[in-house]
Every structure is written in C-alpha cells, then in structure tokens.
C-alpha cells in the first residue's frame, strides 16, 4: 500500500470508527486507461456526509486521495479535510478544518475550534523536508489559517501522520461536543463557502481532473462535495 493511500485509509477508518456513518455511494471512476479511481460517500447525523475520492493512474505517476468530512448545514463545527498525494516528483498533503463562521469576528469560536491546533501546526510547519505548496491567496482565503498544505520528501511525508491524527481527533471531539454561533446563518454561509472551495475558478486542480476524467464526471464529483443532499 502506498504512503498516500495508507495515510488516507487510516484517517478514514478513524472517522468511521468515531462516528455513526453509513456507506451510500461507491462508484468506480474510469477513462480510456480503464479504472482510475473511486468515489465513496457515507452519511450520518452528527457528521452529515463523508466523501472520499481516490485517483490512481500509474501512467501519470498519480496517487491521490481526498477526504472531506462535512458537519450538518446548521452546525458551527468545522468541516475536516485531508488530501494525501504522490505526484511523481514529490509527495504532498493538505490538512485543515474549514471554519463555519468568520474567525476575525468570532474570537471565542476561533479559540475553541482552532487555537488548540497551534502547537501541532507550528511543529509540522517546522519539519525538515517540507516546502510550500503551489496554491494562491484565494485558496488560502477560503480555508483556515491553521491549514497545513505542503509538498514533502518521502521521509517527511512519512512523519505527518501524527499531525493528521491530532487534527482529526480534535475535530471529532468538537463534533461530539458541539459548538455554538448565534449571529450567523450557518447553512447559507456554508453553501457559499463550499461553492467557492470546489469552484473551478478558485481551484485549478479541477482542470487537471477534467483532463483525466472529462468535464461531466468532474462536475459530478464537484456536485457531490458541494451538495448537502
């Protein structure tokens, strides 16, 4: 099992063990090379939806595994995400909790939901073998300041499991505890933010996915990530 797949599978297993979720969708993704990926979706209550998209194309040296765990539309608990990737020349990962309220105007929310991650964030960013990922300010703006997004050597990638586990454990504790924000239309804000996060205009990765899977399949994957239904 590859390093990116092993990290994704461990994380996914921990989420499924921690929350009551039912598999509702399991589809093979293909192109002219044959079967090149898999889409799986689980649904639950405290965690409303988990989406796992894997793309593995040895011809392109691509080994990519995305996990998004979404809380309900009316919840203030952040969403959880992990991307675990090998792209031929380097490994890469993206780890974050996605805020459900504006952090600058909700300090107590920020302190409860994100501040406990600061030691892990600082320790991880200081690891030898990590380098800056090629993403722009717009992508940073729709995520959180605690986002870890890096390219990595094989040795460095092999050490990030502790950070992923720490982020996921903190997120799961928030899910069980719950968070309160009274001055935000959580569902409306979430719909807008998710539309932006998975926008072709914001994230150029969707153009790469389209070249691999075609526009129709790519838009189906985007819709699965955006939709609460």
Image (tube, rainbow, N blue to C red):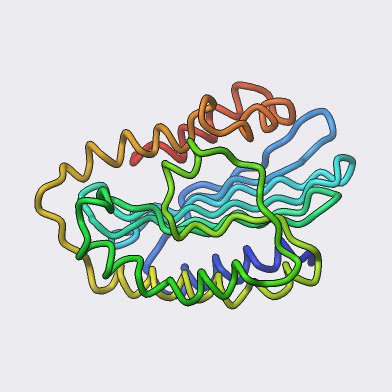
| Outermost residue toward the top in this view | 215
| Outermost residue toward the left in this view | 182
**Image: 86 above or below 171:** above
| Outermost residue toward the right in this view | 59
The image shows residue 218 at horizontal and vertical percentages of: 60, 29
**Closest to the observer: 211 or 151?**
151
Number of numbered markers: 0
Taking 57 as reference, is 114 left or right? left
The image shows residue 121 at horizontal and vertical percentages of: 51, 69
Image point (61%, 71%), residue name: 10
Image point (28%, 62%), residue name: 110
Image point (39%, 38%), residue name: 194
Quadrant assignment for the C terminus? top left
Image point (42%, 58%), residue name: 97
The image shows residue 161 at horizontal and vertical percentages of: 63, 74
The quarter of the picture where residue 6 lies is bottom right
**Closest to the observer: 168 or 160?**
160
The quarter of the picture where residue 210 lies is top right
Quadrant assignment for the N terminus? bottom right
The image shows residue 69 at horizontal and vertical percentages of: 43, 56
């Amino acid at each position: 099992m590859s390093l990116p797949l092993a990290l994704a599978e461990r994380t996914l297993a921990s989420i499924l063990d921690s929350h009551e979720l039912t598999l509702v969708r399991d589809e093979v993704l293909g192109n002219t090379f044959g079967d090149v990926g898999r889409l799986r979706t689980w649904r639950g209550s405290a965690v409303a939806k988990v989406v796992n998209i894997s793309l593995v194309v040895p011809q392109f040296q691509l080994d990519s595994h995305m996990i998004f765990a979404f809380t309900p539309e009316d919840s203030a608990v952040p969403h959880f995400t992990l991307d675990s990737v090998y792209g031929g020349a380097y490994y890469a990962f993206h780890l974050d909790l996605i805020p459900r309220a504006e952090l600058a105007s909700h300090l107590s929310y920020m302190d409860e939901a994100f501040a406990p991650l600061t030691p892990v964030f600082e320790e991880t960013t200081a690891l030898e073998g990590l380098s800056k990922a090629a993403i722009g300010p717009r992508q940073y703006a729709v995520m959180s300041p605690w986002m870890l997004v890096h390219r990595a050597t094989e040795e460095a990638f092999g050490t990030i499991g502790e950070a992923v586990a720490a982020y996921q454990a903190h997120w799961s504790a928030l899910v069980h505890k719950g968070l309160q924000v009274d001055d935000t239309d959580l569902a409306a804000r979430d719909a807008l933010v998710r539309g932006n996060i998975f926008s072709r205009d914001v994230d150029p990765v969707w153009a790469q996915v389209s070249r691999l899977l075609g526009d129709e399949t790519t838009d189906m994957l985007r819709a699965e990530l955006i939709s609460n239904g």
